[in-house]
Image: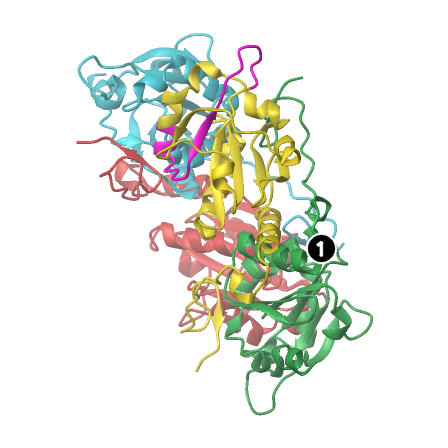
Chain colours: A yellow, B green, C red, D cyan
Amino acid sequence: MALNDSLSPPLQVSQWFNTPEPLTLERLRGRVVVMHTFQMLCPGCVSHGVPQALRVHGLFPRDEVAVIGLHTVFEHHAVTGPAALRVFLHEYRIPFPVGIDQADTASPVPLTMQAYGLQGTPSVVVFDPAGRVRLSHFGQIDDLQLGAVIGQLLAEARPQPSLEGAPRPAGVAGGSPCADGACGVDK
Amino acid sequence: MALNDSLSPPLQVSQWFNTPEPLTLERLRGRVVVMHTFQMLCPGCVSHGVPQALRVHGLFPRDEVAVIGLHTVFEHHAVTGPAALRVFLHEYRIPFPVGIDQADTASPVPLTMQAYGLQGTPSVVVFDPAGRVRLSHFGQIDDLQLGAVIGQLLAEARPQPSLEGAPRPAGVAGGSPCADGACGVDK
Amino acid sequence: MALNDSLSPPLQVSQWFNTPEPLTLERLRGRVVVMHTFQMLCPGCVSHGVPQALRVHGLFPRDEVAVIGLHTVFEHHAVTGPAALRVFLHEYRIPFPVGIDQADTASPVPLTMQAYGLQGTPSVVVFDPAGRVRLSHFGQIDDLQLGAVIGQLLAEARPQPSLEGAPRPAGVAGGSPCADGACGVDK
Amino acid sequence: MALNDSLSPPLQVSQWFNTPEPLTLERLRGRVVVMHTFQMLCPGCVSHGVPQALRVHGLFPRDEVAVIGLHTVFEHHAVTGPAALRVFLHEYRIPFPVGIDQADTASPVPLTMQAYGLQGTPSVVVFDPAGRVRLSHFGQIDDLQLGAVIGQLLAEARPQPSLEGAPRPAGVAGGSPCADGACGVDK
C-alpha cells in the first residue's frame, strides 16, 4: 500500500552483519520491529541504547519482536567503517542483525537516516507488524516507556488478547525469606 | 459479573493513606491498575519495587493507569504498623494511595494477600480496565516487561489504537553533538 | 590524654547489637574506625550509607579497619526503637556492631550525635588508630573519597609502609579475551 | 636510581594527546600517578575504567594526583589507531593526557604493556611520588580499594600528615529533612 511505503521507507543498507541474507522490512512483516540506530563511538549509544536493545532482544519471543541495529554514521566516518563496526559488534557480543546505513555522496547523513528524519543517535524506531512506524524517538528512552509501546503493538496484533500473550514472569524462587531481593512467605 | 469477582477478590484494607476516601477496585474500573505490594522493611521492596512503582506513577497518564500500594505485612507485624508505615510513606515521598492489607486473626498472612495467593514481597498485580487480574508477579520484574504488560492492556482498552495513544517520547534537545547522552546532527 | 578526649567524646550507647559486649572507642584503638551513623527510615542511609558501610566492612582486614554503626534517631522515635532496629539489621543482613545512640530527655537529638556535632544522617565519622576524629562527613560521600581517607590513616599507622600493606587486588581471571568486563592477552 | 628504573620502566609512547608536550614519569615525580590503561573498543574499559579515571581526575588536587591514560592496543590494531582514538577521546570528553603505547614490530602487545607485564585491559598502575609502581591491577577495581591505595601513597608523601590533608568532604546542604539523599536536623 502506498501509504505504508511513504510511512516506512525501505532500509538502505550497504552491508549487513549477523544475518545470512540482507533484511528488508517486508521480510519482517508480522512482527513488531525495534530498530536501534546508533554510532559505535556515540557514548549514549554504548551506555544506554545498545544495552537496552540487548534487553529487548533477550526478553521478547523472537517470532513476535525482531530487534535490528542500524549503524547511522553521520560523523567520524573515517574511523567507524565496516571493519571497525565488525570489531565493535564482536566485542560487545551483539547477536541481532545490524546494517550499515548507506552513505550519501552529497551529505554526511546517510540515506535511511535522512528518509526517516532521524535527528541523531541513539534513536529507536518501532514498527508495528504491518510495517508502519509507530514510534520514532531520538535520545534515551526509558525501558518502561519502550516496553509499553512494544506491549501495545503486540496487543493490537492479536485478535484475541489473552493472558498467555503476556510476557512470562521471570521465576523467582521462594524459599527462605528475604533473599535475592524478595521476601517469601514461609511455608 | 461473578467471573470477575472470583478472579479479582475485593481489596481488604484496614487503613488507607494518600487518598481522601477508601479505594475499591470498582472505583478504579476503566483504568489499568498496577498494585505494588510491599513491606516497609523488605530490602527488595525498598530498592526495587518502590522506585519502580514511582516510575510507573510518573510515566503514564493518571486517567489511564492507576498505581496503588498495598502493605502486605506477613512478618515483623509489631514494628511495621500504621504509625511506622506513615513515616515510611512520608520519608520516601510516596504520592500514590497505599492501603494496609487487613490482618488475619488466624494467620500472619493478611487477608488480601491470601485471597490473591501472593507468595511474598515485592509482588506486583496488574488489573485490566475491566478489573481482571492479568499479571501477578512475585519478586523483581524488569521495567521492560512490566511496561509491555501495561502497554498491552492499554491497547486492548482502546477501540481504535492510534499513534497518539503511544506514550510521548521525552523531548531530547538536539543542538550540540554528543551531549546529555545523545549525538545530534548539526544543522 | 585530655586532648584526645575532647576530640573524640565517648560513644553513649543505650544498646548494642551484633557484639557480645559493649564497644568503646578505647577498645578499638589501634584500628582505623569507620562509624556509619544512620536512621533506619532515612532513604539516603538505606540506599547509600548502609551499602557503603557493608563494602568497607567487606574490603579491609578486620584487624586494621573496624566498621561500626550508630543509630542516631532524631526524628520518628516512636517507630524506630530497638525492636524495629533489630528487624532492620536482620533484614538488611548487617553483620557489624551497631549501637543505639543514647536518647536525650531534653532534646530529640541523641547524646553522641550532639557530642560529635553531627548535622544529620547519613554521617560518617572516621577515627585514626589513636582514636582521634579525622573525618566527619554529613551526607553521601563517594567511595573513592572515603577509601582515600581510610588509606591515608592506614599508612600513617605503619612505621614502614610497604607494598604488602596495600589492599590486595581482586583476582581477575585472564583466559578468554573480553569476558567479565576485561580483555586479556591471549597466551 | 637503578632500582627505580627496573621497577618503573619508561613509558614508550608513540603519540600523546591532551598535553602540550610528551610526558615522562620523571616529569610527574612528586605526585601520585594513576595510569589507566585501556583499549577504546574494550567494553569493560568504556563502562568501568574510563569513568573511574574521570572520577579520580575530578576528585584529587591535580598537584597531588596525576591521572594519565595509556592506549595499550594488543588486538584490533587496524581499527583503533590514532585517528580513531582521537575521536574516542573527544566523544568521551577525556581531559587528561593519554598516550599511545608504542607498537612492537614483533608482537601484537605494545612495548610499555610488555615492560610492565600487564595482562590485559583495563589495567590500572599506580606510582608513588618517587616513581615506583605500588599497584598494578588487571580488571575492574572498586573505587573504595583504588581510593585506599591513593590515600596511602598521599599519606606517605607528607612528612606531617594532617587533617587538612584529607580530601574535603563535599558540602551537603542541611535545610529541610530528608532531601537530596540525607536527613538534616531541624534548627
Q: Chain of mark 1?
A: D
Q: Is residue D58 above or below residue A58?
A: above
Query: Can I make out residue D27 in this image?
Result: yes
Q: Residue C110's spot in the image, x, y percent?
A: 64, 64
A96 magenta-colored: yes
Q: Residue A180's spot in the image, x, y percent?
A: 43, 63
Can you say which quadrant of the picture contains the C terminus of chain B?
Answer: top right
> What residue appears at the point 42 percent right and 64 percent down from the top-left corner?
C95
Q: Is residue D64 above or below residue A136?
A: above
Q: Is residue B88 left or right of residue A18?
A: right
The residue closer to the viewer here, C114 or D33, is D33
Crowd tier of the residue under label 1, counting other residues whose Cα lies within 10 Å: few below 14, some 14–19, many 20 or above: some
The residue closer to the viewer here, A137 or D97, is A137
> What residue appears at the point 64 percent right and 69 percent down from the top-left corner?
C103
The residue closer to the viewer here, B81 or B49, is B49
Q: Residue A87's spot in the image, x, y percent?
A: 35, 27
As drawn, the residue found furthest toward the bottom would be B106
The residue closer to the viewer here, A9 or D80, is A9
C185 magenta-colored: no
Q: Quadrant of residue B174?
A: top right
Can you say which quadrant of the picture contains the N terminus of chain B?
Answer: bottom right
Query: Can I make out residue C11 in this image?
Result: no
What main secondary structure does the magenta stretch of the protein show?
Answer: loop
Q: Is residue B42 above or below residue C65?
A: below
Q: Residue C22's spot in the image, x, y percent?
A: 45, 69
Q: Is residue C46 left or right of residue A63?
A: right
Q: How many discs appear?
A: 1
Q: Is residue B54 above or below residue D16?
A: below
**Residue that badge 1 annotates:** D177
Name the residue type under label 1. Answer: Pro
**What segment is highlighted magenta in the picture?**
A87-109
